[in-house]
Image (cartoon, grey):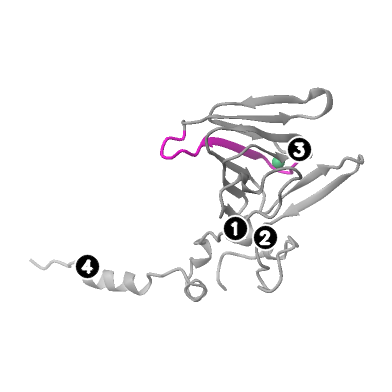
Amino acid sequence: MDEKKFDLRKAQEALAEKTYILTEEAKKNSKFGKLVFEFPQERNEVVAEGDPEDFVVKPQAYFRGASQIPGSEFNQSYQIFVKPFFLDRIQHRHVKDEFLVFLGASFPNVFDFDARIEFTLGKGDEAETYVITKPTIIRIPAGVYHCPLNFKEVNKPVLFLATLFTPMFGGVYDLPDGKTMEMYYNGPVPCKYNPDKKCDSCGKCLQESWENK
Ligand SMILES: [Zn+2]
C-alpha cells in the first residue's frame, strides 16, 4: 500500500526552528513575538500621605497595555494589599469601562476574604458608597464618576485587579479647586525608545503595530 506518511520528525524539526526563548532579539526576528510579553517587576512609587509604604506586596505586576503589547485595548493591575490604606481619593471618570476585582489572596482559596473596603460610585447627589466585605467585581461604565476607594480594614491579603479598556491608564480627575484635569499614568517604567528616560506617558508607542514589518 502506497501510503503518504506524515513525517513527524520533519515537522518537529521545523517547529524547533521556530521555538523561542523570550529575548528582545527573538522577538525582533519572529512574527508573533510582539504578542508575548514578560511582566517587568514594578515597585509602587506613589504613596498617599499618611499611608504606610508597605501596604502592598513588592514587587508588583501590571499590564501597561499597548506600550507593552502593541494594539492592546486594555490595561490591568495585579496587586496584593496587606494593610489598610486609602488608595484613590480623587473622583474621576474614564472614556471606557473599568472593572474592579477584589478577591482573597490567601491562595489557593480566593474566597478566603477578610477585609472591609469602601467604594463610591456616582457623584454629588447621586453618589452611592458600597462596602465590600466579600469577593466582588464592580463595573464602572464609561463616563461614570467613581472613588474614593478606601481599604479600611485588611485582615487577610486582598488581590486587587483594576482593568481599564483603554490602551493606557488615564482619566479625567476632579481637583479640589473645582477644576478638572486629564491625567495619564503608565507606571515607573523606562521609555520604550530611550531606556535612559522614564516613561512620561506621552502615548507615542501606543500607535505601534504588533506586526513586525
Ligand atoms: Zn477609575
Marks 3/4: CA distance? 55 Å
Magenta stretch in the rendered image:
91-110
Is the Cβ of the residue at disc 1 closer than 8 Å to that at disc 4? Answer: no
Which residue in the structure is indicated by mark 2?
Answer: 188
Which residue in the structure is indicated by mark 1?
Answer: 42
Q: Residue at x 77, y 26 (%)?
A: 127
Q: Residue at x 76, y 29 (%)?
A: 122
Q: Residue at x 67, y 57 (%)?
A: 187
Marks 1/3: CA distance? 29 Å
Marks 1/4: CA distance? 43 Å
**Residue 201: x %, y % from top left:** 73, 60
Which residue in the structure is indicated by mark 3?
Answer: 143
State which tag comes first along the sequence, 1 or 3: 1
Is the Cβ of the residue at disc 3 closer than 8 Å to that at disc 4? Answer: no
Which residue in the structure is indicated by mark 4?
Answer: 8
Q: Quadrant of residue 136?
A: top right
Is the Cβ of the residue at disc 2 closer than 8 Å to that at disc 1? Answer: yes
Marks 2/1: CA distance? 7 Å
State which tag comes first along the sequence, 4 or 2: 4
**Residue 52: x %, y % from top left:** 67, 45
